[in-house]
Amino acid sequence: MTATAQQLEYLKNSIKSIQDYPKPGILFRDVTSLLEDPKAYALSIELLVERYKNAG
């Protein structure tokens, strides 16, 4: 399975970004929001499996 632009956008939108956390100048990516979305979580696992299934 190769990710489509639409799927990648869906994943990006399901990850919450928090400016200036934990300190100014840092953009924190909170992936717990991805874990709370069953569709996004399943898609991320599918894409990881596809990418690394032949890695040994």
Image: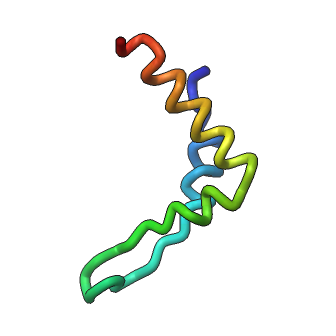
Q: Nearer the viewer, residue 1 or 5?
A: 1
Residue 14 position, x and y percent, is 62, 60
Residue 55 position, x and y percent, is 36, 15
- Residue 42, compared with residue 18, is above or below; it is above
- Please tell me which residue is depicted at 35% across the width and 83% down the height of the picture: 21
- Residue 34, compared with residue 39, is above or below; it is below
Q: State the scheme by which the image is colored.
A: rainbow
Residue at the farthest front position: 56
Instruction: Report how many numbered discs are placed on residues in the image.
Output: 0
Q: Report the side of 42 relative to 53 (left or right).
A: right
Residue 38 position, x and y percent, is 74, 50
Residue at the farthest bottom position: 24
Q: Report the side of 24 relative to 38 (left or right).
A: left
Locate the N terminus by quadrant: top right
Residue 19 position, x and y percent, is 40, 82
Q: Nearer the viewer, residue 25 or 32?
A: 32
- Please tell me which residue is depicted at 67% across the width and 48% down the height of the picture: 40
- Please tell me which residue is depicted at 53% across the width and 25% down the height of the picture: 49
Locate the C terminus by quadrant: top left
- Please tell me which residue is depicted at 65% across the width and 38% down the height of the picture: 43
- Residue 30, compared with residue 24, is above or below; it is above
